[in-house]
Image: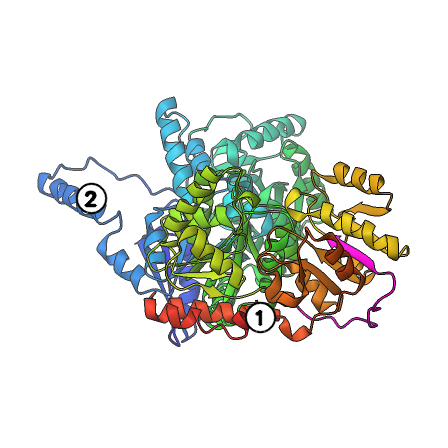
Amino acid sequence: MSDVTRVLVVCDLIAPGGGPAGYTWNLRQALTALAPPDLDVRFSGIVTVRRNRATGERPARRGRRRSNPRAALGRLRHRVGVALKGGIPDPLRGEIAAADLVILQGYQDARRAGLARRSGAAVWYMPHSPTIAADEHAAMHPHESGIRRALIRRRMIRVEGELFRAADALVFPTPNAETAYVEAFGEILAGTPVHHILSGVPKPRRPPGEHGAAASSDEDPGILFVGRYVADKGYDRFLAAAEALHAENPALRFSTLGAGPSRRSSPAVRDLGWRDDPVPVIAAAQMLVVPNRVAYFDLLPLEAAALGRGLVFTAVGGGIDQHRLLSDSVLCAPDDVAGGIRRALSRLAEDPDWGAGNVPAYERTLTAEAMAERWIAQVREWREGAGSAGPTALWVVPVAEIGGVARHVLDATRVGIPGWTVTVLCPEGPLATRLREQGTTVITGAFGPAAGAVASGRTLLAAVRRVRPAVVHSHLAFADIVVAGTPLPRGVRRITTEHGIAGEDGVYHRSSMQARGMALVHRIRLRRFDAVIAVAEATRTAMRAKWHARGPIAVIPNGVEVSAPAALRKQGGAPRILTLSRLAPEKRIDALIDAFAALQAEQPGATLTVAGEGPLRAELEAQAARLGVVVAFPGFVDPESAMAEADVIAQLSVWENCSYTLLDAVAHGLGVVASAAGGNGEIVGAERLVDPDDIPAVAAALLDAPRVPYDRLNSTDEMTAAVARIYRGVVGNEGNAEAVQRATTSTGKGESAC
């Protein structure tokens, strides 16, 4: 990014008034005067000053328009040409391609966001409707046929969903202004950064006279409603409140200023129609009533505040925030507009200047200049973050619970991949919670075996569009297959880490046929990856033997931090033995209990704790009772606390890759007894391994298990540094096979440790 940040603000219509058009008009005027030299801010859209500021509508053309076949043909050719170019005309296409940051103001064609992403620009989306665009359209077009309305609604929801998915960040004026969007698009919005940039308006020019231009009592609007005559704006509630209050006090005046499909006449309310400029009427009013059923952050109340008018808000959406900002305002329930007006009249009777207190609040925070300054600060903050953060790696993990792979993810993201920003995609659950607690960016959604491959692929693609990673790094077989099968944007590199292949087919598969089928799947999906990592040399060997994997495979063992024990573990004597594992056949807990029974015959003070749960618990408890030995089965325990009370860790599994249990045991200075399987020997040394079927040898090893030197371990820093080298080799060399080979065969301490 150059020294000048190029910002493009896109809005279909830029004109005075409310909604995205009026907001962008105000922002354009303020930024034109205030934008610093390091920000090149440009605006794209139709700019016009002829617009009804009260309703946001363009004035109707006067007279009948003459038909012009040549002009009609030209318009048709233009529309066809634009459609063939993805719905984006050439001028806008060029402006988007030149921008660093594209800010989309209001609902519009989502293809613009896609083009910006493909051009390398960041995309911010700021919706402006009080509710989602589809509901806003339905409110403004109540007479559309049912089928047409349903089709339009479906299309608008799809398009707005695409806008949210494509956005790198969302912008709302206040937290309450986003309520309707969170309810409608909550799953899509989850994980997308949100910026709150408070709105502002230019200071309106107050007409001359004590109450503005309307000085006579005949023209005094009294209590005023300004806006569209639709249910969402609370037009009907204002009329009902006015009729009730007018019946109580006929001297009260009520007026409406605007237009809309729900218009009706009322003997208690004067309809002033629409005006090009509502400011003179607002300035002449006693107060402005904003009776919204749903609310974003209306701009007209800010102008009323600048004019010193009191306000009545309903407690919905951004109206809540506006009431907090403006001291001379009243907040009422949406169904008690009459009560809110009564309270406002009471305050006005006590203080004839009620409303003037809103002027200082406006001047402090709600001017267009203050809004522009907030935008400038937010863009600069984004620029600094974009400049300091490295490329992004999206880690894809299909498990929600805490286990070995979750431990790997937690450790790696806590330390960080040097030079990279890591975001994790996983199902909602304990892992996501722990990641958030340590400050890691997490995207959760329908991903994993429970969600299915199709839904998981959609979730992955949505996450890729949101994060725009340079690397997608998958962990575990399900994620590997989904990542391999999902079409990713051009240039995104796929990397996989294999954590759980076994040399024995029966460990993970029900039959040899299933094992052969999955081996074929893995052999095919590996061809889709730009780099492959194994957590142990035994894992790499099994991948080549079982899957016939070709190409380089880097060995990067799991890292662990050494925690020197408080005191040396006792050698000899009666050991305190601990095993931490799932109580399943492949863990060979039965052999451990047999060996413990033999050991206890010589060392009655020895203890055995079998921590964990699984299908064999009852069978193992019965085995211990039959052998006459006391074995503790506490279920799940905190590993750190359990190791602090142990002398020896025993792990007699049929297969392990790079076991965190053994790594932690070595790091804590415990003695280790492990089976000669998988990557165990790479951690503890082949001379310390035992055959689980040789019960006397296992019992002897339990009695005198030596500690393993710390220098056999890989630290977490070394692990993440090796991963960073893989990333650089793949991304920096555009997937060149020789570069990948160099990166994957230069992983530092990794291959010598595990």
The answer for how far apart the CA atoms under marks 1 and 2 are is 64 Å
Please state, as top left, top right, bottom left or bottom right, where the C terminus lies in the image: bottom right
Residue that carries the numbered disc 2 in the rendered image: 79
Q: Position of residue 301 (x, y in %)?
A: 55, 48
Residue denoted by label 1: 753
Relative height, residue 469 to residue 34 (above, below): above
Residue 97 quadrant: bottom left
Residue 355 visible somewhere in the drawing:
no
Give the crowd class for mark 1: few <14, some 14-19, many >=20 residues within 10 Å: many
Q: Can you name the residue that lies furthest to the left here?
A: 70
Residue nearest the observer in this picture, 160 or 723: 723
In the rendered view, tell whether residue 654 sits above or below residue 27.
above
Is residue 563 a member of the stretch shown in magenta? yes
Please report the residue visible at 34 percent of the width from the left and 43 percent of the height from the top.
58
x, y percent for residue 600: 86, 53
Residue depicted at 14% across the width and 37% down the height: 66
Residue 9 vertical position relative to residue 460 in the rendered view, above or below: below
Can residue 352 be seen? yes
Above or below for 39 versus 183: below
- The amino acid pointed to by label 1 is Ala
The residue closer to the viewer here, 244 or 199, is 199
Q: Position of residue 243 (x, y in %)?
A: 59, 27
Residue 564 magenta-highlighted? yes
Q: What amino acid type is highlighted by mark number 2?
A: Arg
Between 149 and 556, the one nearer to me in the picture: 556
Left-right relation of 654 to 629: left
Instruction: Look at 47% across and 45% down and name the residue there.
Output: 459
| Residue 397 spot, x, y in % from top left | 53, 51
Numbered-mark total: 2
The mark that comes first in sequence, 1 or 2, is 2
